[in-house]
Image (spheres, grey):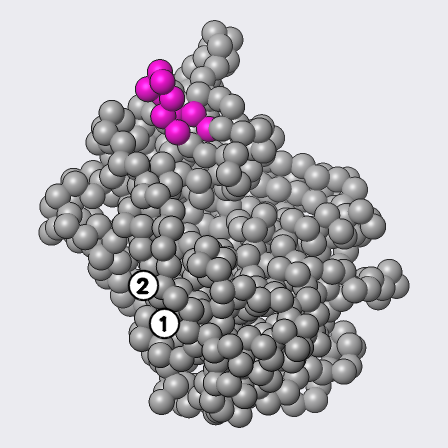
């Protein structure tokens, strides 16, 4: 949001603007101290972002193609700013180029806005006829490079903005299903469902801005997946338009045994096979009770042991997430300044933890909890989880800390813009890993980054991790890494080099290339090893059958030969 951002005010204190989030319109003196101490930031040397470009490369779209779009009643634009906005996602590479160099390698030649499944069919037929590349564009939140135009593409590139396909088409109260157009944004979907007494419960960190079609295309996961499921658990059926027709299944039974499930060809296809247009989702009545909680542990290992036991007993609340000590310190720094009694209360808490319980503030970690359901079920779930936590040495830390930790997730994304203005590059990356390799993976990845930073003479950096989703057989680990780029000629290339080494370490420790961000262009080098050469050949077969001219050529997953 334009009204929400971190800035350094005229008192040389970082504050967060706007009123959309709990820390809005408040000074953050502890965070100010933290960034100076941890990352050696000089708050008196701001690197102002570049101005928005005023000149753009000319569109290569031919008039005959534009005339046909007009005949088909499809809105389009060749305006430079419209094209620039839809030329990128939210990767560090994208944002650094825009803010720090003011350039983008390649932008689409035109943007179209289909307003229905039928309009998408007509647009794809035209693109196939004229051999125009189509890049589906939803909320623009991709962090894998999927929506970035391939720099070497010589054909006309058309961004297909699905934002006008944002309707709830029908809702079946008996079956608890709803059919929704794929361009709808997460928070708009929830608003429409909640006004009717329902929820789909899918809440990724990006849900304020990401689209339903994007969730399907990347096999997304939400913070409340324990109660509502990941996107693959929520889908009943999907419609995808390809150059060779519509991939769709007519039956909406709860489970079907009729050969391979082609929903799973669409899930994770990342815009390389076609455009997702409509989705039938499972929905649930709104929960009668919503409650937050938190647990503090003496160290990360104890916290992971608790998370494992909760998963083993299958008593996870809607969300349970464990942050390591580095993230705990970071989260503490983001709290606003309190008055005398607030400071006294914080001091008493610290004394209780350190003096009476023997916890070290340099080792403690915290889990945040969100419970949703009927009041009696929530109460029983709380008892079970806090009993497990107590057995391993954890302490209940209250609802306020839980709610604050949960909502801060939506604020963290705004920090990167401030960081770039003061010489810090930062990004997140994630993986899934079996339980028996979780601690080893976390230790080894942090060690690998320590080694790489030392070799590159990077002295001021942050590497932290958290467990964000848990399963019977393993969990999702989310890493945050950032550094002061002083002395680095190309900070983005340096970051990408270090993350690549970290990704190699993740794979060596038994982790995946992604849990929910997808492959995109950034991780496609590891794709063949993840699915086997036979798996790549199978994907290529689908590609040739559904898109023989390769007009869905965003370059994600695997480059067809």
Q: Position of residue 69 (x, y in %)?
A: 60, 76
Residues in magenta, as a range: 7-16
Q: Which numbered dot is residue 105? A: 2
Is 1 situated left or right of 359 in this image?
right
Vertical position of residue 445 compared to residue 368: above or below = below
Q: Where 24 falls versus 262 (above or below)?
A: above
How many marks on residues? 2
Question: Residue extending furthest top?
Answer: 340
Which mark sits nearer the N-terminus, 1 or 2?
A: 2
Q: Which residue has dot 1 on it?
A: 150
Front in this rendered view, residue 520 or 534 = 520
Residue 335 appears at what percent x and percent y?
A: 46, 25
Q: Residue furthest right?
A: 174
Q: Is residue 237 left or right of residue 463?
A: right
Magenta span has 126?
no
> Mark 1 and 2 residues: CB-CB less than 8 Å, in contact?
no
């Amino acid at each position: 949001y334009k009204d929400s951002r971190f800035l350094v005010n005229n008192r040389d204190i970082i504050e967060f603007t706007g009123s959309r989030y709990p820390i809005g319109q408040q000074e953050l003196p502890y965070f100010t101290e933290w960034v100076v101490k941890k990352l050696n930031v000089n708050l008196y040397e701001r690197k102002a972002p570049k101005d928005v470009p005023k000149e753009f490369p000319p569109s290569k779209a031919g008039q005959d193609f534009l005339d046909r779009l007009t005949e088909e009643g499809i809105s389009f634009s060749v305006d430079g700013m419209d094209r620039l906005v839809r030329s990128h996602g939210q990767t560090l590479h994208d944002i650094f180029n825009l803010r720090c160099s003011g350039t983008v390698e390649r932008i689409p030649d035109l943007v179209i806005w289909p307003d229905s499944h039928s309009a998408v069919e007509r647009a794809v037929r035209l693109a196939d006829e004229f051999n125009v590349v189509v890049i589906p564009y939803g909320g623009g939140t991709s962090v894998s490079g999927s929506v970035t135009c391939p720099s070497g593409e010589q054909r006309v590139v058309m961004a297909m903005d699905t934002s006008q396909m944002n309707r709830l088409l029908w809702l079946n109260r008996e079956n608890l299903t709803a059919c929704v157009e794929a361009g709808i944004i997460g928070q708009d979907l929830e608003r429409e469902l909640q006004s009717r007494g329902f929820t789909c419960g899918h809440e990724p960190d990006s849900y304020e801005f990401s689209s339903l079609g994007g969730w399907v295309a990347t096999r997304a996961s939400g913070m409340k997946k324990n109660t509502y499921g990941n996107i693959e658990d929520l889908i009943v059926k999907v419609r995808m338009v390809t150059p060779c027709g519509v991939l769709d299944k007519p039956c909406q039974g709860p489970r079907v045994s009729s050969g391979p499930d082609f929903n799973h060809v669409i899930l994770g296809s990342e815009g390389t096979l076609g455009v997702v247009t409509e989705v039938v989702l499972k929905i649930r009545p709104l929960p009668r009770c919503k409650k937050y909680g938190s647990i503090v542990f003496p160290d990360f290992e104890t916290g992971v042991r608790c998370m494992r036991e909760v998963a083993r007993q299958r008593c996870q609340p809607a969300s349970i997430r464990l942050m390591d000590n580095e993230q705990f310190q970071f989260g503490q720094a983001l709290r606003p300044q309190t008055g005398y009694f607030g400071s006294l209360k914080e001091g008493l808490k610290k004394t209780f933890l350190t003096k009476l319980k023997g916890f070290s503030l340099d080792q403690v970690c915290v889990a945040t909890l969100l419970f949703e359901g009927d009041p009696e079920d929530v109460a029983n779930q709380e008892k079970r989880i806090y009993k497990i936590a107590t057995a391993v040495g954890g302490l209940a830390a209250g609802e306020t800390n839980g709610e604050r930790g949960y909502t801060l997730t939506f604020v963290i994304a705004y920090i990167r813009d401030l960081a770039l203005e003061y010489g810090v590059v930062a990004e997140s990356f994630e993986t899934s890993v079996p339980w028996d390799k979780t601690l080893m993976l976390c230790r080894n990845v942090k060690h690998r980054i320590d080694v790489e930073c030392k070799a590159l003479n990077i002295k001021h950096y942050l590497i932290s991790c958290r467990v964000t989703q848990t399963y019977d057989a393993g969990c999702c680990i989310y890493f945050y890494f950032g550094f002061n780029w002083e002395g680095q000629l190309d900070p983005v290339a340096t970051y990408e080099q270090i993350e690549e080494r970290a990704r190699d370490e993740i794979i060596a420790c038994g982790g995946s290339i992604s849990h929910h961000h997808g492959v995109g262009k950034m991780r496609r080098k590891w794709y063949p090893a993840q699915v086997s050469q036979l798996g790549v050949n199978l994907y290529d077969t689908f590609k040739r059958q559904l898109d023989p001219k390769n007009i869905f050529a965003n370059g994600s997953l695997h480059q067809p030969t």
